[in-house]
């Protein structure tokens, strides 16, 4: 009876174990990829179960839960601390504030407080609802250089970029990708900034929707010769199928992803980091943190970005 009771207690661990298996097999199949997105909350669940088994003195269950939790920490770590250099401590940086402010969010005061607390050089917003779009001057006070609010026929993809330095918008195309692209004259030199919002993964949208959008994004980014910062709601963690595709196809580094950004109602460790910041390899991320809540179901991301250290060739003897 004791053994059957122990087996019964293992049932809740099946979910985290399935997420771990999907992450380890590195399958590009849509179902496995959806499971990979949940490594962070699965880890939290495995830890809670481990503590429960400790309290219940279920030794075998403790060992199994420990293995699952350790495995999930292993697969989630690259999301939280991806590879990529950092600028020198004394090097100048710019601060970028990026956020999905949520189409139904009307709390412009909370958005403004969040922006003021972050004190960014560049603001990149997606999912601007009617309340947000009606108070752009209030929301972006102190940021005189702005793109035109993008309205591409889908209210979820209305976006804007604002900065303290001059920017010039370019790159809108009828290619299925919702994005705003600007070139800025920054303290680090000329740079390109892109805010985008990828569709949700299958089965909620067409299976290949995200892949086609990444192809379109790659076609836009590849010709650019100056440093590029890409931010937005990618509906994918950096280690998922889409995150891997973005990093490899455009040769980008990802900003760290701890703590998670969505849904904002959950504690940070239980959230999924689908709101990303990617940079070309001539840039480096010095710091990444979350901003104050804007009233959205996504948390805003604040990233400090500088030029990557220049690698000098070793002297030939």
Image (cartoon, grey):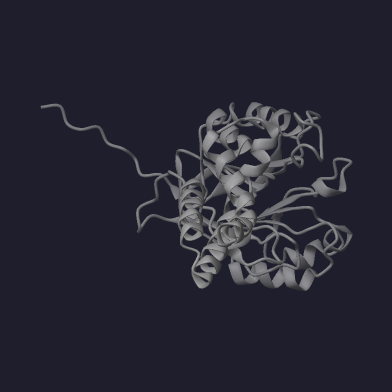
Residue found at x 74% / y 72%: 110
Q: Is residue 99 left or right of residue 251?
A: right
- Asked where in the image residue 219 lies, by quadrant, the reply is top right
| Figure disc tally | 0
Comparing 25 with 33, the one in front is 25
Q: Is residue 126 left or right of residue 121?
A: right
Q: Where is residue 299 drawn, in percent x and y?
A: 67, 62
Name the quadrant of the C terminus: top left
Residue found at x 59% / y 35%: 246
Residue found at x 51% / y 72%: 55
Comparing 246 with 132, the one in front is 246
Question: Considering only vertical position in the picture, is 287 above or below 233?
Answer: below
Q: Where is residue 254 drawn, in percent x and y?
A: 52, 44
Name the quadrant of the N terminus: bottom right
Question: Considering only vertical position in the picture, is 221 above or below 286?
Answer: above
Residue found at x 75% / y 59%: 101
Q: Is residue 48 left or right of residue 33?
A: left
Question: Considering only vertical position in the picture, is 129 above or below 170?
Answer: below
Question: Considering only vertical position in the picture, is 173 above or below 45?
Answer: above
Q: Is residue 120 visible?
A: no
In the displayed image of the protein, which residue is found farthest to the front?
1
Comparing 174 with 203, the one in front is 203
Comparing 262 with 72, the one in front is 72
Q: Where is residue 160 drawn, in percent x and y?
A: 74, 51
Q: Where is residue 14 drawn, in percent x and y?
A: 62, 50
- Asked where in the image residue 217 lies, by quadrant, the reply is top right
Q: Is residue 203 left or right of residue 61?
A: right
Q: Is residue 70 visible?
A: yes
């Amino acid at each position: 009876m004791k053994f059957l009771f122990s087996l019964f207690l293992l049932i809740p661990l099946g979910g985290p174990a399935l997420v771990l298996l999907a992450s380890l097999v590195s399958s590009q199949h849509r179902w496995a990829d959806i499971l990979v997105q949940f490594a962070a909350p699965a880890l939290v669940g495995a830890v809670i179960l481990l503590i429960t088994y400790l309290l219940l003195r279920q030794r075998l269950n403790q060992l199994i839960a420990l293995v699952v939790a350790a495995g999930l920490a292993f697969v989630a770590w690259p999301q939280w601390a991806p590879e990529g250099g950092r600028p020198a401590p004394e090097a100048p940086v710019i601060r970028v504030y990026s956020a999905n402010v949520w189409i139904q969010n009307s709390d412009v005061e909370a958005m403004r407080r969040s922006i003021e607390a972050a004190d960014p050089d560049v603001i990149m917003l997606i999912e601007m609802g009617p309340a947000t779009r009606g108070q752009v001057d209030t929301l972006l006070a102190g940021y005189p250089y702005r793109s035109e609010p993008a309205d591409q026929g889908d209210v979820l993809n209305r976006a804007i970029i604002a900065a303290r330095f001059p920017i010039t918008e370019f790159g809108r195309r009828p290619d299925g990708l919702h994005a705003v692209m600007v070139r800025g004259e920054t303290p680090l030199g000329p740079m390109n900034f892109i805010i985008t919002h990828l569709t949700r993964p299958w089965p909620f949208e067409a299976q290949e929707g995200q892949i086609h959008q990444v192809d379109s994004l790659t076609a836009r980014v590849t010709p650019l010769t100056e440093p590029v910062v890409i931010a937005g709601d990618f509906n994918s963690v950096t280690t998922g199928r889409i995150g891997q595709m973005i990093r490899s196809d455009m040769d980008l580094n990802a900003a760290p992803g701890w703590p998670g950004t969505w849904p904002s109602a959950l504690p940070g460790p239980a959230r999924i980091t689908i709101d990303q910041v990617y940079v070309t390899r001539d840039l480096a991320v010095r710091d990444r943190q979350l901003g104050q809540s804007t009233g959205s179901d996504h948390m805003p991301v604040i990233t400090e970005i500088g030029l990557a250290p220049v690698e000098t060739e070793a002297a030939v003897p």
